[in-house]
Image (tube, grey):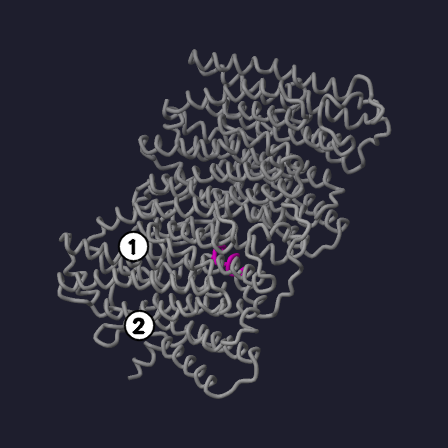
Amino acid sequence: MFLSSLIIAPLITCVIILFCRGLKQVRIISLAGAIVQMILAFIFLIQYWKERSSGNTSAMLFESDHTWFAALNIHYHIGIDGISLAMILLTAFVVIAGVLVSWTMEKLSKEFFFLLLFLSVGAYGFFISLDLFTLFFFLEVAVIPKFLLIGIWGSGKKEYSAMKLALMLMGGSALVFVGLAGLYFNTANGNGAHTFDLLQIAQMHIPANVQKIFFPFAFVGFGIFTALFPFHTWVPDGHSSAPTAASMFLAGISMKLGGYGCLRVATFLMPDAAHAYAPVIILLATIAIIYGAFATMMQTDLKYINAYSSVSHCGFVLLGIGMLTRTSINGAVLQMVSHGLMTALFFAAIGMIYSRTHTRLVAQLGGLLKVTPFISTVFVIAGLCSLGLPGLSGFVAEMTVFMGSWQNPDKLYRLATILACASIVVTAVYILRAAGKTVMGPLSNAYDKLTDATWNEKIAAGLLIVAIVIIGVAPFLLYDLVKPGTELIMNKILILK
Amino acid sequence: MTDFFILMKQELIIMVIIFILLAIKIGRYRSNEWLLDMVNLLLLVNFAAGFFFNKEGMLFNDMFRTTSLIVLEKNILSLGILIISLQSYSWLKNHKHVLEFYILLLSTLLGMFFMISSGNLLMFYLGLELSTIPLAAAANFDLQKKKSSEAAMKLIISSAFSSGLLLFGISLIYGTTGTLTFTGITTHITHDPLQLFAFILLLAGFAFKISVVPFHLWTADVYEGSPVAVTSYLSVISKGAVLFVFVSVLYTVFKPISDSWYNMLFLLSVLTIIIGNLFAIRQTNIKRFLAFSSIAQVGFILVGITGTSQLGTTSVIYFVLIYLFSNLAAFGVVSLVSAATGKEDINDYKNFYQTNPVLSWVLAIGLFSLAGVPPTAGFFGKFFLLMSGAGQGNYFLITIAALNMVISFYYYLRIVKAIFMDANDHPIEKLAIPGFPKIALYMCVAGIVLTGLVSYLYDHIHSLTQVADTVPFIGK
C-alpha cells in the first residue's frame, strides 16, 4: 500500500488551490481533496482489516522506508498500526467537516483553505511517521498554519491568542527536540551508529537513568500540545479566537498530536521512566480534569466553555496514559478519538450559532431550538457526548479510562480515579446549563428570523454525529482496531513489572 | 604551471572580472542598465565556473590550498554575491558609481577566497584585510546619507581593532611555536598559558568579525547605516566566509586544545544567543532587527561548532548555505521596499499583504526559515546544528538553545503578524518588481524549499568533510 498518498493527496490539493480563482473554485477543490483523504483513509482501514484477518501480526503495516539524511541515519520511515489508523480516520472526518463549515469563507478564501489543508498534511504525516525525525518534522509543520489561521481569520484578541499558541507549541517542540536528541545519542545498534527509528529504539534497552532524564522533556513537550496542566493556557485563548474550522482542527486533531506523542514516543520508548514519573503524570492529569471542569463552570462564552472542557477531557487521555494498565491505555486512545470528534462537532455547532446570532455569550442566547432546530440538536448531541451519555462515544471512552484506572491497585491512584470520576458531575452541570440556556427558554425577538443549517453544515455535522454514534453503539469496532497497537506498548511496559 | 591555473581558478576569475570592470571604467559605457546586465552575467559565469575543472592541492609552499570542500565554500559565496547583485538592481540603477561598487565588492570576495584557501596565518591575515577594508568603503555608498558614512567609519575602526587583536595573537603564536603554517602550529600548540592567551586573542578577532557577543556592538549601527546591499553582504557573505575559516581553524589547527576552546565556545554561544535574541525583540528598524537576529543566528552556529569535527563542519557549512537563502530572501524584500519608498520601520510593513501579496509571502518564508520552522530549510539547518552540539552530550546547552529558538520565534512572528494581521490604512503601495530582483527572490525561495527537503546537499557536504576530517591537510 502506498501510505505516502496520505501526505501527497492534501499537498496536491494545496497546489491546485494556488491556481484557483474565487471562493467557488477553491471550496470545490478543497472539498474534493477532503473527500479523497476520506476515501484513502477508508481504503487503508479495509486493507488493514484484510491484513489482520489474514493473520498478519507485524507491529506496523504498509511500512516503507527510505533513507533521507544518510549522514545522521535519518529515514523517511512510515507505517501504521491501529492507533495511527484511528487517528487518520479522525483527521479525515474533521478535515471534511472543517471544509464544509467554512463553505462561505469570503475573506482571503484561497489562503484559508490552503492553510487548512496544509495543516492536515502535518497531522497525517505525524500519525504515519515511524522515524522520530520525520515525526518531529510534521509536528512542527502544523504550527505556522495554526498561527496564521487564528491571526488572520480569528475573532476577539486574535493576534494575542495566535502568538501565545504558536509560542507555547514551539516551546513544546523545543522540549520534544531535547528529548529526541537525548534518545538518539543513547541508541547504539552494534556498529556505533545512532538511530531515530521508533521500532528499532523500542527493541533496544535505553538505560533507565537516561530515560529518567529525557522522559520529562518528551512527555512535557508533547503534553503542552495536549493541554497538560500547567501548560494548558494556550487552549482557551487559541480555541476561542480561532475561526470555526481552525478550532475544530485545533481541538479535534492538534491536541491529539500531543496525546499520541506522549503515548507512542515518551511512554513506548521510555517505559522505565514512564513508571517512575507516573505519579506526577497522574497528579497533573487529575488537576487538569478537576480544574478544567470547574473553570468551565465559570465561563460565559460558548467557545470558552468548550475550550476549558477540552482541557478537562484531555486530562482523561493523560490519566489513562499515566495509569499504565492495558485498559486505561486503550481508554486513552478511545478518548482521543472520541474527544476529537465530539469537540469538532461542538465547535461546528458553536460556529453555526455564532454566524447567525453574532454572539457566543450564553446569557444573550436562548430558545434557539424554536428557530434553528437542526443546529440546536447538534449542539445538544455534542453536549451529551461531552458529558458521557451512554450510546455516544464519550461514554465508552471515559468509562474505559475509569475502568482501566481502577485496575491500578495503588490507593492514591484510586483516589485520583474517584476524583476524576466526580468531575463528570461538574461536566453535567456546565453542559446542561449551557445547553438549556442556549437552546431552550424564551426566544429573543432579535433571533426569530434565523435560518436553520444549510446543506453543507448539515453534512458536516451529520458525518461527525454518525461517527460518534457508531463508536458509542459499537465500540468494539474501534477497540479491536486499536488493541494490537496498545498491546505492543503494554508488552513493553509489563515486562518491567 | 597548469596546477597554478586550475587551483587558483576561482581567484583568477574574480581578478579577470575586476580587470574587465577597470577596463570599462577607463573606456566608456552606455548606461547603468547595460553595465548591470554585464556584471550579473559575469557573476553568473563566475558561479557556474566554480563547478568545473576542480582539483585539490597546495601552492606556494603550502600557503594556498584547495580541497573540494573549499571549492564548495567558495561556490556558496559566489552564489551569494550573485543573488545580492541581482537584488540591488533597483538601487544601483540610478547610482553614479556602479563600477566602483562592484570593484570594491569583488575585491572583498577575492580576499575571502584567499582567506578560505589559506594554509598559513599570514596568508589568512592578508585575505582577511583584503576582505574588510574595501567593504568599509562600500558601506559608505549611500553617498547622501550621514548614517552611511557613520557606518563605514564604525566598520573600519572596529575592523582595525579586531585586526590588531588578531595580529597580536598571531605574533604570540609565532613567538611560541616558531611557525606560521597551519600544520606546523597543530604540532606545536599545547596548553601553555602564553599559547592559550594567543588563542584567546585570535578567538576575539574572529568573534569581532562574526559579531559574537560581547564583540557585537558595531553590528547594529553598521547594518542600519549601510545600504541594504552592503548590509546583506556583511551579514551573509563576509560572515559566512569568516565562519568557514573559523571552523576549519578550530577543528584542525587548534584541535590539540579543543577541550579549552570547547568551554569558551559554550559560554560565548549561550551569551550570543540570549543577548542577540533579547535585543532583537526591542528593535523597530527592520535592518537593525535583522542585524540582531543575525547575531542570534551566529550563536546557534557556535552551538553547532561545539560538536565533533565532522558533524560540526557539515552542519555549519550547510547552515551558512541555508542562512544565505533565508537572509537574502528577507533582505531582498527589504531592499525593494527601501529602494522604492525609503521605509525601513517594522511598523511600515503593517498590512503589507494587502498590497504586495507575493513579496509578503517571500518575506514570510524567509523569516520562517530564519526562525527554523519546517518545511523550510531553516528547520533542517537548526536541527543539524543542535544535533551536532548535542553529540557532545551537553544537553544543558541544547536546552538553552532550543528554548531560545522559541524567543526568536516570537520576534520573527511579530513581523509576520505586522504583514498579515495588523490593520493599516496606508500600507506600502504596490511595488513593481524588476526582472533581476524577481529572479533573485525566486532563487532564494527555491533554495529555502529545496535545500532542506532534498537531502543530497547535506550528504554531499558530509562526504566532503569526511575527507577533510581524516586528512586535515593534503600532502601531509
Q: Which of the two residues, A166 or B280, is positioned nearer the viewer here?
A: B280
Q: Main secondary structure of the magenta part?
A: helix
Extreme residue toward the bottom, this view: B27
Q: Which of the two residues, B330 or A414, is positioned nearer the viewer here?
A: B330
Q: Can you tell which quarter of the image residue B464 is in?
A: bottom left
Task: Give the number of the disc on residue B309.
Answer: 1
Q: Position of residue B317 (x, y in %)?
A: 38, 59
SS label for mark 2 = loop
SS label for mark 1 = helix
Residue at point 48%, 31% (across, down): A223
Q: Is residue B99 visible?
A: yes
Compared across the picture, whether B300 is left or right of A264 comes to: left
Chain of the residue on which disc 2 is drawn: B
Compared across the picture, whether B372 is left or right of B156 comes to: right
Question: Dot 1, how many residues are within 10 Å of its Cα: few (below 14), some (14-19), or many (20+)?
Answer: many
- Amino acid at circle 1: Ser
Q: Position of residue B272 (x, y in %)?
A: 36, 48
Residue under numbered circle 2 = B56
- Amino acid at circle 2: Glu
Residue at point 45%, 76% (across, down): B100
